[in-house]
Amino acid sequence: MKILVTGAAGFIGFHTVRRLLERGDEVVGLDNINDYYDVNLKYGRLTETGINRESVDWYKFTQSDRYPHYRFIRMNLEDMQAMRMLFANEGFNKVINLAAQAGVRYSITNPQTYVGSNLDGFLNILEGCRHHHISHLVYASSSSVYGLNGKVPFSEHDSIAHPVSLYAATKKSNELMAHAYSKLYNISSTGLRFFTVYGPCGRPDMAYFGFTNKLLKGETIRIFNYGNCKRDFTYVDDIVEGVVRIMQHAPEKRDGEDGLPIPPYKVYNIGNNNPENLLDFVNILQEELIRAKVLPTDYDFESHKELVPMQAGDVLVTYADTSALEEDFGFKPHTSLRTGLRRFVEWYKDFYNSEKA
């Protein structure tokens, strides 16, 4: 099976690529390696999959020296002509679209960035699937689409009519675009609403990673809404397990009573189904940083914490109803927050120590 994975140098993309390669799939990874955060981290992920940094160049395939069935190409999703050529030349069976401009808060100050990658780029993915008979498109949505939804846990059947950030609006748009293409062109597509993903090789703009960086520098961490928020933290390996299971089962293609295709379209939540209070999350992170000797046992955490009001684009709680995922795939994320943060801290210590060496 030949699979295109976009966002291959990103957090979830890297873990997904590695999992597929270990399964024996043939993979083409695509990423533009932008500087939204430290590119050294992105190149570090690529190195883990055998892609040499010095060999990476725009619109040029790089062969992995670790996995014979893996090639990587640096490209922009929004480059329509390049995307057309990629689909025409490669003969993909399935597509996993994990590329996007991420970040709720960044979308408030840099809105234009989100249109190119998240809307124009996704349209190019849909067009590629339309014209080249892709058997299944799996794409990343987000729990942020639930916006001001007051009902918890969040179900796939709930309204997503009121997003509170442009990022969330682009993810909702992706779901609508995918549904339209599923209806018009009978393309099997599945959107995955990820809930607060964390783990090794993560994104520095996420709280757990950013807090660690700041505490190590002796800076103050800001905890929004005075710590009275809850997040359904979901470990990255659980996310990838969901992606791979779902990829293997495309929504069924069938006709309705009118003789026209019923859209082969699904959406699933992938979350831990267990929201954690932010202050509890910070306490566990502190304990794990001390345990791993990243921070000294006498570190004064209280003097490095600031409780601040809610900020624009945030929501009080995220909480995934995963009953559809469990029913259809027999799977539910299960990694505890302490276990996941411990693995992150151990990776962080090894990665940044090796960088200094």
Image (tube, helix red, strand yellow):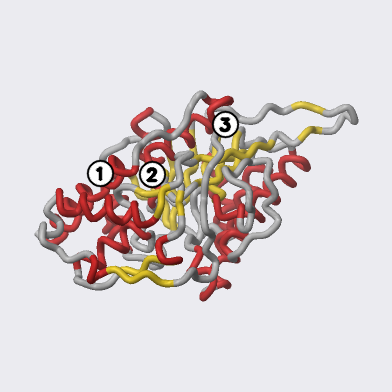
The quarter of the picture where residue 339 lies is: top left
Count residues near mark 3 (Cα–Cα under 10 Å), then give few for <14, some for 14-19, many for 20+: some
Q: Position of residue 149 (x, y in %)?
A: 64, 53
Q: Secondary structure at mark 1?
A: helix
Count residues near mark 2 (Cα–Cα under 10 Å), then give few for <14, some for 14-19, many for 20+: many
Q: Which residue is mark 3?
A: 323
Q: Who is closer to the viewer here, 190 or 284? A: 284
Which of the two marks, 2 or 3, is nearer to us in this view? 3
Residue occupying image coordinates x 49% and y 42%:
4
Q: In the rendered structure, which disc, 2 or 3, sits on the residue that comes first in sequence?
A: 2
Q: Position of residue 1 (x, y in %)?
A: 48, 29
Q: Which residue is mark 2?
A: 71
Q: Position of residue 291 (x, y in %)?
A: 15, 49
Residue 48 in the figure: left or right of residue 100: left
User: Is residue 325 depicted above or below 195 in this figure?
Assistant: above
Q: Is residue 88 visible?
A: no
Q: Which residue sits furthest bottom?
A: 109
Q: In the rendered structure, which disc, 2 or 1, sits on the residue that comes first in sequence?
A: 2
Which of the two marks, 3 or 1, is nearer to us in this view? 3
Q: CA distance from mark 2 to mark 1?
A: 28 Å
Q: Secondary structure at mark 3?
A: helix
Q: Which residue is mark 1?
A: 343
Q: CA distance from mark 3 to mark 1?
A: 27 Å
Q: Who is closer to the viewer here, 38 or 165? A: 165
Q: Secondary structure at mark 2?
A: strand
Q: Who is closer to the viewer here, 154 or 113? A: 154
